[in-house]
Image: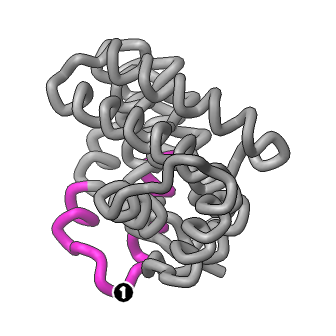
Amino acid sequence: MGCCKSPSDIGIARLHQTNSARTNSPLTQAEIAQLETFLSGIPDHCREPIIILPARQLLNLYQDHKKALYHALQREWSLAISYEYRVIKALQTRLSPDKDHYIFFNFYSILSASFLALGELEAAIEGIHIALAILLKHTPMDYKTISNHYYHLANAYRALNDWKATTHYLIKAIETAWLSNGFDQEYIRMLQTELQIAK
């Protein structure tokens, strides 16, 4: 079952209390606000392993992720990839049994988009598959985001001229989009048109 992504004041308070006891340099209000923003994007049921991490380290990783996002928006794809890989590697070490934790979703999404922009299609496809697996595990009822990732996969396979995979993921995108009550009908029509072209 999916979850909502509402901020958790209890989680933030626990993070701050736990880390205040372990650090010589307490976080400023601005830094606490940055961590609150970061944690608010993580479903409540996925926060427990995150809030026990040292706050300063978590903040530094979040700031590296923001740098990756900035470089992606500037179309500096190699820098975006470099920062995102650094964040992923550091968090995989700290969350060793939870390498598919929800926190990795946005990192792999930016990573795969950057690879796609560079034309490194196999790496992009691998990243999209990882992001999609994370979504399906942790937020299986987030139909809109899941459908969008199926669509991204279809586009990546289309660029490889793999029409069978393109068709498969367009169908998955359409089927998933229909599960969402408030989904954009125009988006569904666009997917259906692309499916007809791909067949």
- The residue depicted at 29 percent of the width and 58 percent of the height is 30
The residue closer to the viewer here, 122 or 109, is: 109
**Where residue 192 sits: x, y (%)?**
29, 57
Report whether 93 appears left or right of 114.
right
- Farthest residue, direction front: 24
Residue 37 lies in quadrant: bottom left
**Where residue 107 sits: x, y (%)?**
47, 40
- The residue depicted at 27 percent of the width and 65 percent of the height is 188
The residue closer to the viewer here, 151 or 78, is: 78
Residue 163 lies in quadrant: top left
For the magenta stretch, what is the residue range?
A: 169-190
- Identify whether 123 is placed above or below 106: above
**Where residue 58 sits: x, y (%)?**
54, 46
The residue closer to the viewer here, 40 or 81, is: 40
Q: The residue tagged with tag 1: helix, strand or loop?
A: loop
- Taking the magenta stretch, the answer to whether it contains residue 26 is no
- The residue depicted at 64 percent of the width and 58 percent of the height is 50
- Identify whether 142 is placed above or below 168: below
Which residue is denoted by mark 1 in the rendering? Answer: 181
Main SS, magenta region, reads: helix
For the residue carrying disc 1, how many other residues have a C-alpha within 10 Å: few (<14), some (14-19), or many (20+)?
few
Residue 81 lies in quadrant: top left
Q: Is residue 199 visible?
A: no
- Taking the magenta stretch, the answer to whether it contains residue 186 is yes
Report whether 46 appears left or right of 7.
right
Amino acid type at mark 1: Asn
**Where residue 126 sits: x, y (%)?**
57, 29
For the N terminus, the quadrant is: bottom right
For the C terminus, the quadrant is: top left
